[in-house]
Image (cartoon, rainbow, N blue to C red):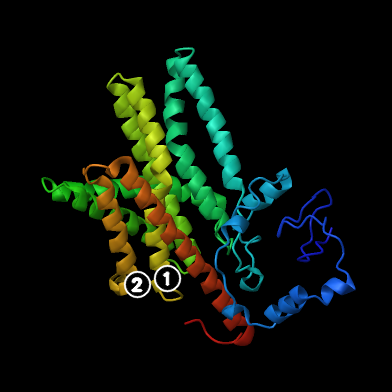
Amino acid sequence: MKCLHCGYLNPERVKSCLDCGYNGSSPDITTEERNSLFYEFASFVDTIPRGERSVEPKFRNIFSRVFRQHSELEAERLFIVGTALTTPKLQEVKETWPKPWLFARVFLFALIAFLGLYLGVSLFQNVNFIPGLIIVGAFTVPLTTLIFFWEMNAPQNIAIYRIVYVVFIGGILSMLVALVFFDILKNNINPITIGISEELAKAVTVIFFVRKLKYKYILNGLLLGAAVGAGFAAFETAGYALRGLISGNFQTLYATILWRSLLAPGGHVAWAGLSGAAFCMIQGDKKFELNLLIKPKFLRIFILVVLMHALWDTPIPGIFPFGQLFLMAASWILVFRMIRKGLKEISEKKWRFNFYPFEPSS
């Protein structure tokens, strides 16, 4: 069934287009409507080169598909992107803001599992549920946030299995690198050195994964950085939760999982994502060189991330939770600005390809 809105060829049982979400319920356009000012304006917009069009975010549109009904086919289609056979060509990539929805379903499923584990521990006093409670509690919000970044990856060139790989390998690798830095610093541990050590460890790990030209888009760096940050955040939360359990206080265990989960989207996940996006922004189509790391565009973002991390850990009155909530909001303002840059980058690359198809990559 061909979509009347975007022309995408959908399977027969799909109610809404798997590509643009159009459900075909809108009536046919009349001659009077076609002559209206709206369609005149739309025709005028179509004449503007895509590289010059605005990709400003409209938050009501970004989350417009969260509360709609979605079929299993739609979810299955999302999970098969990123392979050699399913990665779209640059000409087919949309530079408009994606409309993610799967992340909300992942959060709901994980929340139901966590509540079941919580009942097993608190109501039935079964200690066999405790490991699952810690693991699911530690991973739920970082994983949900990561799925959001994955859905926002407009090039759709990174498969979900690759993301899972980066979460586990990148997460533990970045933690081990951070421990090496802490061991070097030894007695000089404070919020500033913690911020430098952990963010540098995550940045090094992210750069290891995105240094190949296969992942050259800003949105790729944002996604792979978020994957490293999600692994780091989940492993760290699980460790703190275990400490609370060892202390013999279940309230400490629950409080640790609750607060670290609430604040997780604006912490390690967002910060590592910003570092990855900043690196891809300055690398572009060039091969990896160490001097890229001293470029002002990268250093500005990295230093800002380190400062936010240091403030996050600073033991000043009011920093928890109000200061951290403010820092979380600031982090996501930067994230959405970086997404906008990533979409603009795709738009410009498509424009250059359409008008200068034989021009070598810069």
What residue appears at the point 38 percent right and 67 percent down from the top-left corner? 279
Within 10 angstroms of label 1, few (less than 14), some, or many (20 or more) residues?
many
Q: At 52% across and 85% down in the image, what residue appears?
A: 360
Q: Does any portion of residue 170 appear in the rendered image?
A: no
Image position of 233 with respect to 212: above or below:
above
User: What residue is drawn where x is 28% and y is 62%?
Assistant: 303
Amino acid found under the numbered disc labelled 1:
Met
Left or right of residue 32: residue 50: left
Task: Judge left or right: residue 37 versus residue 344.
Answer: right
What is the distance, in whole Å, between disc 2 and disc 1 at their CAs? 8 Å
Q: Check whether the beta carbons of the residues at disc 2 and disc 1 lie within 8 A of each other.
A: yes
Q: Quadrant of residue 152?
A: bottom right
Q: From the viewer's side, name the closer residue of 335 and 221.
A: 335
Q: In the rendered image, which residue does mark 2 sit on?
A: 297
Circle 2 residues within 10 Å: few <14, some 14–19, many ≥20: some
- Residue linked to disc 1: 281
Q: Position of residue 54 (x, y in %)?
A: 57, 73
Query: In the drawing, does residue 147 fall left or right of residue 44?
Result: left
Amino acid carrying mark 2 in the image: Lys
User: Residue 41: x and y, percent?
Assistant: 72, 78
